[in-house]
Image: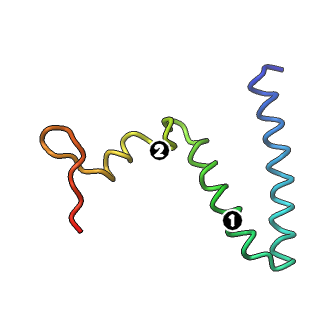
Amino acid sequence: MSNVEDLYSIADSHAKTLQVCIDRLHELGGNEQLKQLTGRLQKLAARATAGVDDQGTKPDQRKARRPQNLKGRAARRVS
């Protein structure tokens, strides 16, 4: 097995464990804990997406969120 396959196997095993924990939190009514976990999982999902840069966003998405002026600098936000 390659290192990639080994790491995937470990991650998959942990994902299954996490799924069981989430189901149990639902049963116990742990809504606040589920909200916290949701935020963390969303960040992890973004990191796991192909083409993500060091800031955790895709470069095209980051540019779309920050309009730039003609000189290539981020445009000032209007309040």
Residue 13 in the image: above or below residue 4: below
Q: How many labels does the image show?
A: 2
Where, quadrant-wise, is the N terminus in this rendering? top right
Q: Residue 57 carries which label?
A: 2
Q: In the rendered view, does 69 fall on the left or right side of 57?
A: left
Q: Earlier in the sequence, mark 2 or mark 1?
A: 1
Q: Which mark is residue 36?
A: 1
x%, y% of residue 76?
Answer: 21, 54
Q: In which quarter of the image is residue 27?
A: bottom right
Where, quadrant-wise, is the C terminus in this rendering? bottom left
Which residue is drawn at the image coordinates 66% and 55% (left, top)?
A: 41
Name the amino acid type tagged 1. Answer: Gln
Q: What element carries label 1?
A: helix
Which residue is drawn at the image coordinates 78% and 31% (left, top)?
A: 7
Name the amino acid type tagged 2. Answer: Thr
Frontmost residue, 37 versus 5: 37
x%, y% of residue 77?
Answer: 24, 59
Cα–Cα gap, marks 2 and 1:
20 Å
x%, y% of residue 73?
Answer: 21, 41
Q: Which of marks 2 and 1 is in front?
A: 1
